[in-house]
Image (cartoon, rainbow, N blue to C red):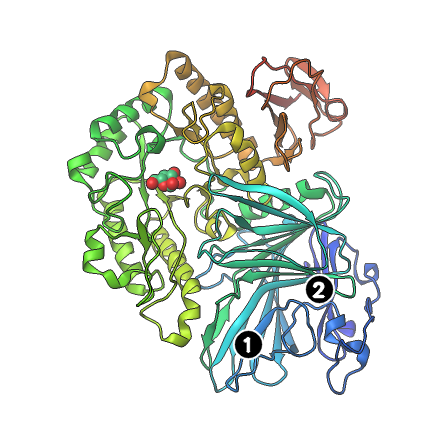
Amino acid sequence: MSVQFIENKNLFILSCAKLSCAFYVDANKRLVHLHFGGKVLGEEGLLPQEIRKGHSSFSPWADGEKPEDSADALPLEFSGFNTGDFRINSATVLTENGSAATDALYVSHHIYKGKKRLAGLPSAFAGDHDSVETLEITMRDTACELEFILSYSVFEECNTIVRSVKAVNNTALPLVIRRLMSAQLDLPHTGFDFVQLSGSWSRERHPERTPLHSGIQSIRSVRGASGHQNSPAIALAAHDATEYSGDVYGAVLAYSGNFLIEAECEQYGTARLCAGINPENFSWMLAPGESFETPEVYLTYSGEGLGGMSRNLHDFMRSHLIRDGWADRKRPLLVNSWEAAYFDFDSAKLLGIAESAAKLGIEMLVLDDGWFGARNDDTTSLGDWFVNTDKIGDLGELVKKINALGVKFGLWFEPEMISEKSKLYQEHPEWVLHEPGRRRSIGRQQMLLDMSRPDVVQYLFETISNILHSANIEYVKWDMNRNLTEVYSDMLPPERQGEVAHRFMLGVYRLHEMLLKEFPGLLIEGCSGGGGRFDAGMLGYVPQIWCSDDTDAMERILIQLGTSYFYPVSTIGAHVSVCPNHITGRSTPFATRGNIALSGTFGYELDLTKLTEEDQALVRKQVADYHRYHHIIARGDLYRLSDSFKVNPFDAWMYVSKDRKEALVTAVCRFCQPNSGVRFVRPRGLDPETVYEVDGMQVSGATLMSIGIQVKLEPGDGASRIYYLKAL
Ligand code: GLA
């Protein structure tokens, strides 16, 4: 049983293989947090319930309660606003009288097997795992019939608890939600580092680690997308936690729009974490009888450092977030036309690339930007999802010819966008997200469609479906190349404009859902100028996301390892591109570009017709490596072996198959240093008692893990090797 209720103590215990979470209903009906961390065996393993009673008169208590019951001094699962808890909070709801005071107490609970899906939002699923159980706790405001249903789904084998909150207006008057966080977690001390993934376009998700300090530390987005700048996921790592040991708490928000994740160190020496939709300029009108659901947060705990946290989350997302079995399925090994041709292609050029692909064992050609409307550069035609027949002739015929070569076909779209120079804009200028009377912001020569409008979503569904029905298109790359500005919708009254950014996101998710229903099995790759929308929300619809426009292999080490802190390697879009690299101008050996792209979905982003004989031979080897190692990389356990928080002269990481019979170690020398000594890489996660064959030697797992593999590389920047370990 993963959810237990101990009635005589009003105590809830949620148990995973290596994680326990406990809270109880106190005499005043508050939901008091007790434990989130390492596994405890039953109620006897928990600390006594009164873990903290410190308070001063500046921490108020409710009339009729005792001073030590102050909400400000208790660790709570859910907290309101303007009623005594002055910390960052779960919910602020405005009532008809203009008051934002919110305070909710326990009413009832319900435990059931499995997990419900959220309506219109990405959501985790139980799949065929019988052990998944859900606890729903109903809380009610102390002044009105506003209810909050807190949901906790326990994914035992992945050490992950999925949380979300639903607000239900049972009053007779409309209410306005100002803030509704998906989860609040109170931890009993502040000795943590805040670990985040930050960066910019082409430099996404570099890990950063900073000690928590008094006050609030946060990451957020107001871009209408999760953004290149911060990924909606953080870890709180004990100061002494490393990649391999120590306490680490992970929180991943399954949302792709404006988000906030914040941690507050407060006066009594505890830390509170809140994650959810960014309350900045957010409001949601809740009519009587209506409800509002927050996105989900995936909370995990690892006593095995940051690496253990990543492995929990990888297992969880692969089994319970990524749909249609794609997490385990081999993706077609593809070549993408973008860096091969940009806008400059015709059907002959595409067929040439497809012919080369067929000869090299590459399984799919993805036609990127430039195939529609009158688009030959980035100034026109977004929204006109009609084939540019002058450029590529009949799409159905082209795809038939490509398929006849034994190559599949994929196509690029940027559904949420509209160019001023487009037929769609002439017909529907009102579909653009804009605020009447204010000048518009332009980004990459394009504007955004108002995805909160059902007619816009329907138009996109119909036009994209027509294209997908017109040819054998087995893959879609869904791009989004700018962020939201002048977020305002003609469809909504002034008092509801605070809903637009979230409604935009709901429109994006709805379009994904509609397309996946119409085209079951369609493989969609997410993208946003590279990795500007790489988050667990998108992963609820797409099994892979183009990780960065920066395809430089050396740059990709930090980007991909950074991304791997929270997201499975099988979701990371990674391709071999041409050198000198189009963004950095750097040249890296072809073999290394392949070795690094293998730690992702794998493919090519170059003109295959221009490869030298030598590079073609390397492509054939890389294709063989992809097939040989895919199951270990996509389904195995990842261990980062070097310090992924900085640029190192030498990096290494590895994968171990779940049965520990196979492993793959990648070692890369970023900068060659003369006379740099003997270099051993110590693998992790092997079976100490098993003998492995590696590099022509037979060595026990124990010896390998204590002494390591001696890495011998050719001199030169960017030299690399992959070592395959097989249990004998
Ligand atoms: C974005 C993507 C690229 C490519 C271009 C096309 O930048 O990240 O991969 O698709 O758009 O315009």
Q: Is residue 99 left or right of residue 383?
A: right
Q: What's under tag 1, amino acid-wise?
A: Val
User: Percent x, y for residue 550?
Assistant: 46, 34
Find residue 266 and report its horizontal and vertical position in percent: 73, 64
Placement of the C terminus among the 4 image quadrants:
top right
Image depth: mark 1 or mark 2 in front: 1
Say if residue 174 shows up in the picture.
yes
Above/below status of 552 relative to 483: above
Q: Nearer the viewer, residue 419 or 144?
A: 419
Q: Secondary structure at mark 1?
A: strand
Q: Nearer the viewer, residue 213 or 273?
A: 213
* Picture disc at residue 470: none
Res. 392 image quadrant: top left
Q: Residue at (37%, 12%) from the top-left corner?
A: 613
Coordinates of residue 119 in the picture (x, y in percent): 45, 64
Q: Which residue is mark 2?
A: 4
Mark 2 neighbour class, 10 Å CA radius: few under 14, some 14 to 19, many 20 or more? some
Give the structural element (helix, strand or loop) at label 2.
strand
Q: Establish if 60 lies above or below 727.
A: below
Q: Which residue is mark 1?
A: 93
Q: Residue at x 54, y 36 (%)?
A: 560
The answer for how far apart the CA atoms under marks 1 and 2 are is: 31 Å
- Please report whichever mark, 1 or 2, sits nearer to the chain's N-terminal start: 2
Q: Is residue 165 above or below residue 311?
A: below
The percent coordinates of residue 682 (x first, y second) are 71, 26
